[in-house]
Amino acid sequence: MSKKKKHFSLLLTTLLTVSLALTACGGNSKNNAGGEAASGGNKASETTEKPVELIWYTIGPPQKDMDKVLTEVNKYTLEKINATLDIKMLDFGDYTQKMQVMAASGEPMDILFTSSWAFDYVQNARKGAFLQLDDLLKNQGKGIVDTIDPAFLEGSKVDGHNYAIPANKELPAQEVFRFNKELLDKYKLDLTSVKTMADLEPLLKTIKENEPGVTPYAMVKDFMPIMPFDYVIEKMPMAVYMDTKDYKVVNILETPEIKEALKTVRKFYQAGYISPEVATTSSVDDLYKAGKWFTDRASTQPMADNLWSASYGYPVVSTPASQPYIYNWSVMGSMQAISANSEYPEKAMEFLNLLNTDPKLRNMIDSGIEGVHYEKISDNMIKNLPDAKNYDMPTFSLGNIMINYLNEGDPENKWEEFKKFNDAGINAPLLGFNFDTSKVTNEIAAVQNVKEEFWAPLMTGSVESEEYLTKANEKLKAAGLDKIIAEAQTQIDAWKAANNK
């Protein structure tokens, strides 16, 4: 995976998750000073304390050149904070399961990756797997507090406390309609009029009638129409309205908005704009590779069109499909926690502070060794060398991306554009609220099972929505949906009162 793709991966279809890193972008000397100040300003040569080794578990495929890079990294961290690293990587598909086993068994570790989608942050914070970081942030982590957007730390609190350091990256989540520009240009189609899914119809009709080998709307089985809701649990039917004043939790499958949206999807399905196998389709990568699609929907970030175009090998353009909202899950998309069993919690925070404020360390861990894995083509821009394939770390998972070098082809104002994107973010109503599911664990499992039966056919238009909605709601209520909503309402009301919402 190229560095360009890495910077984008999390969170487009993902999962994509940037900051107001003004201090971090203020120059190397400023950032280095911040790292030293937070650790007392002492280098190893100025202290008599015994060096320590920090064990860091993080996500991603193990890297061939990890030992080579760690040799250089450890020279630097030993000088800066009198500590070295032992980085252990677990691949994406294995991370959650293996970390659950190791955390439960008390495996020695100091720092570990957690998120809203891998080794669940909220759940494990409440289980006691992570150390509470409030005091450490005030002392050894002051550089982090001064650098990253306050929304990251505020939005990632669990029961009023911080248990991990969010990566300084894109803060809001925003959906866009994407288009194969070659087809847009061929038929002189205007995307400026597209604001909602329904607005796509005349464009889709043109493609369907003139391009028999093209799928007009590339869609997969986990598709869900954009709705005006902030979900209590992502992709579950409990939510509050985005413009809520009373914070009432509703079953979205009983709202007029979902009924109208599903009518549109059903209409598209019946017209042949969507693949007839959509309810069982998990990937449309073959369509992207062949350029045999016209439109779809994706999560965006600044300059996303350039990255998509470079990835696919033909021009892709987009237009907003939603507002840029800041959700709990977007704030918690990439985090580093300190294990509750860490032998060196203060030193672990010193390292995380250095990682998030020191460009030299951050880029070394991210991109490897200059002259081996990359070469600098300007003061702040690098070009990958052939050996970069031996050290291809997932950038989003490693902390503050705002102090990363630019990649060849990136615009000079890249991080300024990220800042503008973050500034435009709108707080979702449940930002900062985390549902404690302990009283409704069985009901959530039962509702999840019902959801698996109905969700994909409903959301992709593969079935008649009115009839299927009735059946789905009957089964969801029988599974305990109303009890979950009642428990969520009780907790949200208490949270709302405590936070003067």
Image (cartoon, rainbow, N blue to C red):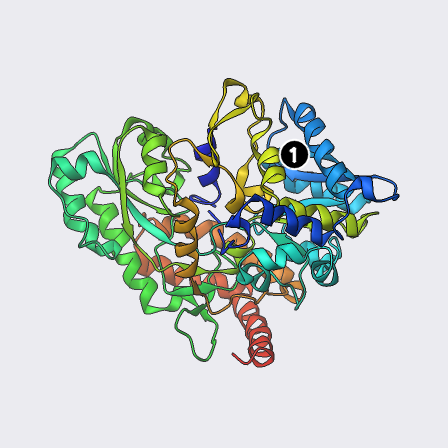
Residue 219 in view of the camera: no
Q: Point out residue 135 in the picture as x, y percentages from the top left corner.
A: 74, 63
Query: Which residue occupies 65% across, 39% down?
Result: 58
Query: Which residue occupies 28% across, 46% down?
Result: 318
**Residue in the foreground of this view, choosing between 375 and 494:** 375
34 sits left or right of 268 in the view: right
Tag count? 1
**Residue in the foreground of this view, choosing between 215 and 33:** 33
Residue 437 in view of the camera: yes
Q: Quadrant of residue 390?
A: top right
Disc 1 marks a residue whose amino acid type is Leu
359 sits left or right of 184 in the view: right
462 sits left or right of 188 in the view: right
Query: Which residue occupies 76% across, 53% down?
Result: 40
Q: Which residue lies furthest to the top in this view?
A: 386
Classify mark 1: helix, strand or loop: strand
Label 1 belongs to which residue?
Answer: 90
Q: In which quarter of the image is residue 287?
A: top left
Image height check: is 63 above or below 120?
Answer: above
Q: Quadrant of residue 96?
A: top right
Q: Point out residue 109 in the picture as x, y percentages from the top left corner.
A: 77, 42
